[in-house]
Amino acid sequence: MALMAASRRRAGSSQDGNFYGTTAYGGASGDGNVFRMTSAGALTNLVSFNLANGGTPYAGLVQGADGNLYGITSAGGAYGQGTIFRMTPNGALVTLFSFQDSGGFRLGGLVQDTDGNFYGTTSDGGTSGYGSVSK
């Protein structure tokens, strides 16, 4: 099973006691994946990105107030510029948004505020070219 590739992201624990994380490369198409690891160390590939559903997720995942996992990719999607996605803990992935322009490099993950809004950042782009924050 082609699962793991070099990962600089932190695997985060979730409400179900498992750890979830991403790799920017690897998976079935080489475009990254989302994995689950149990506390006993059993590893499962949940999603393999294939550019149609996103690709190269440099950031980890955040568990939303609804129990789903949310993440961001830096490539792929409808316009090839990355996606924001929602995934159930069992691996059912839904693309919520496809970026239409580069707008900067998406290295950071998402955060959720107390009102349920998600925010993300870029390392460049934006008005002055030094990055941006988006809701």
Image: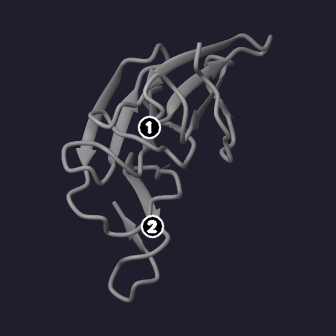
Q: Which residue sits at x=32%, y=69%?
A: 103
SS type, badge 2: strand
* Residue 81 locus on image (x, y percent): 29, 54
Q: Residue at x 37, y 32 (%)?
A: 86
70 left or right, relative to 3: left
User: Observer-nearest residue: 16 or 79?
Assistant: 79
Earlier residue among tags 2 and 1:
1
Q: Which amino acid type is shown beneath numbered disc 2? A: Thr
Question: Pointer 1: what residue?
Answer: 70
Q: Quadrant of residue 23?
A: top right
- Which color mode does the image show? one colour
User: Residue shown at 39%/45% (left/top)?
Assistant: 116
Cα separation between marks 2 and 1: 17 Å
Quadrant of the drawing holding the N terminus: top right
Query: In front: 55, or 72?
Result: 55
The image position of residue 48, as x and y in percent, is 44, 25
Q: Do residues under tags 2 and 1 come within 8 Å of each other at their CB atoms?
A: no
On residue 117, which mark appears? none
Tell me where residue 123 appears, x and y as whole percent. Answer: 50, 71
Q: Is residue 112 above or below residue 65?
A: below
Residue with the mark numbered 2 = 122
Q: Which of the two marks, 2 or 1, is nearer to us in this view?
A: 2
Q: Does 70 sit above or below residue 28?
A: below
Asked if 18 appears above or below 58 in the picture, the reply is: above
